[in-house]
Image (tube, coloured by chain):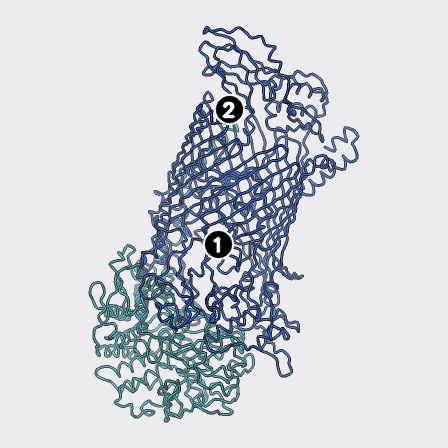
Chain colours: A blue, B cyan
Amino acid sequence: MVLLRKIKGEPMPPMYQLFLIMKLVVILVFLNLACVLGRGMGQQITLKAKNISLVEAMKSIKKQSGYSYFLNGKDLANIKVSAFIEGQNLTAALNILLADKPAQWVLENETIVIKSKPLVKNKDRNTRSSFVSPSPSTTLQQRTISGKVINSNGEGLSGVNVIVKDTPIATVTNNEGIYSLIVPPHATILVFTNVGFKAQEKLINNQIRVDVEMEEQIDAIDDVVVVGFGKQRQISVIGSISTVSPKKLDLPVGNLSTSLAGQMAGIVTAQRTGEPGASSDFWVRGVTTFGAGNRPLVLVDGIERPLDLVNPEDMESISILKDATATAVYGVRGANGVILITTKQGTISKPVVTMRMESGILSPTVLPKMANAEQFLNMFNDGYESQFGDKFYSDETIQKYINGDDPDIYPNVNWTDVIFKENSANRRVTTNISGGGESIQYYVSGAYYQEDGIYKATKTAKYNPEIKWDRYNFRANVDMKLFKGNTVSVNLSNQFDIKNGPNNNTIWQYTFQVPHIVSPIHYTTGELALPGDGGVNPYELLNERGDIKRFTNNTQSLVNITQDFSEYFLKGLQFNVKFSWDAASITTNTRSKIPMGYSNSGRNADGELILIPRVTTQDYLTLSNSNTGERVTYLESSLTYNTDIAEKHRIGGLILFNRRERFDNFPSNLTNSFPYRNIGLAGRTTYSFKDRYFTEFNFGYNGSENFAPDKRFGFFPSGAVGYVISNESFWEGLYPYINIFKLKASYGLIGNDQIRGRRFAYNSEMTSSTGYTFGQGGDRTLTGISVGYQGNPNVSWETAYKTNFGVEIELFKSLNIKADYFDEMRKGIFIQRLNVPGIVGLTVDPFINMGELSNKGFEVAAEFNKSYGNFWLSGRGNFTYNRNRLVYDDTPEPLFEYLSTQNKPLYQQFGLVADGFFQSQEEIDANPKQMFGTVRPGDIKYRDINGDGQVDNNDQIAMGRTHVPEISYGAGLSMGMKNFDVSFLLQGVDNVSYFMGGSSIYGFTGGSALTGNVHEDVALNRWTPENPDAKYPRISISPNSNNNRNSSLRQYDSRYLRLKNAEIGYTLPESISKRLFFDKCRVYVQGVNLLTFSPFKLWDPEIIESQGAQYPNVKTVSLGLNMKF
Amino acid sequence: MKNILKLLVISCLSLSSCNEYLTHDVDQQLTFEKTFARREQTERFLAGVYAYIPNDMILLENMTGNNDEGYFMWDSWSVKYLNHNSGAWNPTSTDYHIWDNMYRGINQATIFIENVDRNEEVTEQSKKEMKAEARFLRAYFYFLLIRQYGPVYLWGDKPSELNIIPTEVDRHTLDECVDFISSELRRASEDLPLTISDTRWYGRVTKGAALSLNARVLLYRARPLFNGANIYKGIQNKDGNFLFPQQYDAAKWADAAVAAKAVIDLNTYNLHTTKKTGTDMYKAIQSYSEVLFEPWNEEIILGQWVASADYVDRRASPWGVVSTAYGGFSPSLRLVDTYPMASSGRYPVTGYLTNGEPIIDPLSGYSETGFTENFRNPADLTVTHTFKAHNSTVGREARFYASILFNGMYWINTFKGSKQIFFQKGGNAQSTQSDYNKTGYLFRRLVNPANDIESSRWGKFSWPVIRLAEVYLNYAEACNEQPNRDEANALLYINKVRERAGLNKIEEAYPEIIGNKELFRTLLYKERMIELAFENHRYWDIRTWMIAPEVSNGDRYGRNQDATTYENSWQRTKHYMLPIVFRTEHYLFPIQQAQLNEMKNLTQNYGW
């Protein structure tokens, strides 16, 4: 553009030039991409047309003038214009074109911007009087009816279709919105339709003049919902689908899965670690099977791809498909729900550049607090004394540890402080450019994200054990129109990330478990210190063991060709073919070393430390390397047909074929070297009548390689009905209050062919087994061969029977409520038979379709939007409850009914019922014998559930919940006033529990006292004779099999409520941003996980780790800048 | 339009041949047919069956620490070991269970026996031998089950059935089990070669192995636990048959004697003696040591190759002194007390007072007090270190010095310099925390002095699963007990074992033994304890002899390593020693709850 101007020799304001150069530099630097659109040189405009859309007209003007144009508002594009312009300049031409149209234009930054005219409420409507009212006629005869069609501003609307209902008689309004047509004698109704407006029906009665004010259908475009293989109008969706604006998911976090929590009804998430680069777990409507793969299918632009590889900025839409109808066309892959994401496409406009920069500070939500030296020493002494009758550490020794006079022999190191920083940082830069001309549109984006970990690592020249995660995203979506009705889209995307970290994955565990007194970091003489006898120095684990670098590279490519046959032989018929090829590779380079370090055995006579060197050392780095990778190709072709008959009957059809092939690039065995293949045929028919009654029928016909040839194909039908009562004529009275009232129901079957850890379930396999060594020198080792898995030719599909009832209500045009009840029954879940007696001697238990799981629940989502002048407000909330019940899993019937896992939630937790602590030997003797080891005062007293006089594992009962929450909810509010906007989202889960355990809870289980430190809470609140009403039992120095069991005392309620996200933004007034040469500029502060409320305090409740020894979840506060130019 | 047509054609093509698309050529994998068509694969299948032989070296940790021959120092971890010792185990505990794994081995062996004849690449003779090997292995797995659980379910010669009706399953009787095992072993012995002539196949089962195992099985059957023990009387399986014999039958000893004699009569094996030169004591020490360290020596009847001895090397060498060591495999003080005196040939300790003090046989020459200055370890010929030795360690027989590392001794793997070892508090081999050596001894017999274990040269074993000394002791025991007592052979064969250790004849040490069946039995128990120490026999011996309540129950004693001086570290103490618990039900393992769940009518063992 700059170049063109120069050629034209027109002077440019210096600031303008500078700005344009800046733009270019930004584009080149950040994306290394330039896209210059061709543009005509003609200044004289000629346009002769009648009733063409404004878009068409502008395309022509653009061609002639060289100016890009931008239609500010979707409805503008469809305004019909007529013009007779010959050789006018641009200004004149546009003025003529837009005369008496509800639009005005302005030239901004080389672009013709067309906007709606401001509202003029009291416009003179005298035009009506210019009509001469004909005298009324009561005879039934052919007559002429005329009238004017206006919009809400009173302006005449051109191009409106006027149809005599149930006849082919029709006309179109002229430039002034006036029409006239001859109607047959029995005609009673006129129908007025125009794109962008609600269709209206008017009774003719005896009138000869029918005026109509058309109501704009503002939401017409927003209300399209992305459904499986296409889009549907919101009103016609009768499957269960949730959506959220992708903007809401654009949080300053590394992975999209982390942003999903609390955003949509029906999705259950859990973030189990806050380590940079780690994903969250997510399920649709909870866990629905205990077979393989309970995760939803994620489709990006129709292709199965990992969710976390999507740059949130690139998302155009995200939908969650939940019930059988919505997911049916995905066949077997969609049994656990589907997450559909589409990425942005270019639009016809000048290049628009958007940039966002963000920089944040991260800190752990909760960092566990461990016992200090004194607490530990007292605890150890108490345990020692109860076992051996005397104290291990004298008071004098304890004092030496505490006062720290001799840190070499009596160290006192707070490992948490040594290993962790208080906070770390992340930053993100994203930029995208979109635009395009008539035949090519593009959307190109790039993003960079970086997050540091909270390890306090020492970087050396040799290597860097810091946790650091860098990710680069790139995407180019290009749409080309080759000929009429044809679109070829090419979507290319690449993600590249590097994760750096220390060469040790036990740092958390040991930082918590190593008592403060075990070892200094370094001796005062400078040597690296090590505790003897298998102890560890966490500092050494973090800083001195080398590093791990993991490179991940994903390349995703898609060609999508759509051909609309409307113009050729059948209106509404469309053919689509997609082909994608994706490749992913992960390389992990581990560089390791073992440094020299010294334990000590006290001081010699001269007072010098006696150092004992570590024996096996390796003071140089060595490399080990591992690779994983896969490549996937996918081919899909489909034919869709959509038509309507007289605007009453809408009929749609889809038939689709797909085939997917995945190769493991580094197969671990021969079986895995065969490509993984899926094949499927799917279909959908929809029929609706007058937008009131809807029906839909879907089927999937799928083939699976896992089954014997005669069991290979499965047919899975589903159907749904919907009734929009609010579209009935009798609803009219209620319409102002309840705008939409829709009831829907669906039922269907979905299959699943995934079998955990097993392919080709029908096929018997020999396995390699442990070998045996023969020969004089043991030089003949034969790897064993055993009969392994014994194939089951009868294995076939696991089937989900899904039922869904839903209601959708819109009140006062501002509050939208959706509620669904769902009931899913999984049958034929693949299980390994568990009650084949051990005496049969199978090496692998056979698989069989026997498991059954039921899952029921409901979900509600509400959304509220309202604006009052300058102030706007929008709120949303969602609530999901699901309870599953394991119906059958082939576990042998236990001794006592209550021990059975069947008819209880999947993953139901079981434990002993703790009745406090034994306070005396007499109490122990008086109670049922506890069979887990010698019991002393201070140990947990358990209840003898079955009354057999002894407490053993048969006294465990179902208690608490499971680690997957049954209830997930979220609620958010956004509001804005003038240039300010504020929003926040609360998110929480409930009905979830977990067991504490492990040595930092039990003390002294995993090893010796060298790794026996516990949480401060445990050290302070343990049972001692002086503290009989304790929270935790006594500490013993050898493993205490009585106390170290799952019991009601060890179970905790891990529900929580978080302030998941909060954001304050300020958009610079246009006057300022314009001066800075931005179209839009917004500054914001955003926080994630700012507050967490939970009854459980020791560590982040979302982390499922029995002693909290896991990288904690983090809270983030970010400052960001968002620019558009 | 042309393009559109092209697209349609392409997509139509993609619709074709769906079933083929999903058919992978899985037959290219190794199939059952291929396994039994080729010699190599068939041999590997058999090797897979061999692999079910449990590794006795690992079992040392399992069973040796759980009875009176060892006391492992790990008091604060190794939970299963602690639970087992303290009696904190029950049918729901999963530790040490072998049930499922042994039945897997049995299943694979049966599949092999059923199918090996399909192979046309293998000679008929080889097939016969291989089938006999599988038969031996299957019998061995059944034996291991019986040793642990008592009688079990027998599949016999028929393959296992996936669709067996679990409620119809119960255990067979002990006699049915032993009869089956014994007949299988005799049948195998007919087809097995006397020796393995091809050195590349050392380690395969021979006729001698089958006959020796048969001798062991029949000896176990004759011992009190399986021969009319009161506690097991009256237990019936679901068919109403008594699981255990209802009365004592002395004739079973005679069967055991005949079986053991059959091995001896093969004249194929000899007690190993060293080729090294030196004093008689030194040679005796070497002879006994080399039973473990000389691969495939003439004493080994069935050996199991262990390519790296690091598992035992680390655990049986002193922590803190040997850099690669974990320490911890301590012999119990009871075991240390049992080794005879070299000169008198008498076992020094005849019993214990309730306070743990030993009752010393005054004729033995043993002294529990005082020290000998400048003592030299008779096992240490190359380096002449002398040290101040406690008198309890002076004048003992060869196997003592081959086996026991005691406080104050020098470590004789001298590759990294000479090291004297002190276990007491503040000593160089004493850990600072609770996991320290508590008896004051380590079982050094497992560490070959010729290996530089600090450079990770661990050495290799042809671990004796069965060796001739055991057969001799089996024979001696059976001869002593059989109705027609054969004293001459009983003495002859116990003396052969003693002689290799440099000891006099037992009737010279104990003239009163002649005609004294009970004394012979007492001394044989002692002899067996030391000769086969840490070879995974003692745990089962004290149970089948039913002496566990006396020897492996209650307080345990060690030398006081909590003492701060070397001299004081020799006091006997139970301080810091965890007691061992033996209850009547502990004679046999319980049938696990998992099995009872699977098979509702399975009969549980006494007391569980």
Residue A579 makes an appearance in the image: no
Tell me the amino acid under the disc marked 2.
Ser
| Spot occupied by residue A1014 in the image (x, y as percentages of width and height) | 52, 65
Question: In terms of sequence position, does the residue under pointer 1 or pointer 2 come before the other?
Answer: 2
* Chain letter of the residue beneath label 2 in the structure image: A
Q: CA distance from mark 1 to mark 2?
A: 57 Å
Q: Which residue is mark 2?
A: A566
Identify the mark at residue A1054; answer none if there is no mark.
1
Q: Residue at x 28, y 66 (%)?
A: B604
| Spot occupied by residue A422 in the image (x, y as percentages of width and height) | 62, 58
Q: Secondary structure at mark 1?
A: loop
| Spot occupied by residue B129 in the image (x, y as percentages of width and height) | 31, 67
- Tell me the quarter of the picture where residue B79 sits: bottom left
Viewer-proximal residue among B40 and A358: A358
Counting every numbered tag in the picture gives 2
- Tell me the quarter of the picture where residue B171 sits: bottom left
Looking at the image, residue A58 sits to the left or right of residue A289; the answer is: right
Graded by Cα atoms within 10 Å as few (under 14), some (14 to 19) or many (20 or more), the crowding at tag 2 reads some
Q: Secondary structure at mark 2?
A: loop
| Spot occupied by residue A183 in the image (x, y as percentages of width and height) | 49, 10
Q: Quadrant of the N terminus of chain A?
A: top right
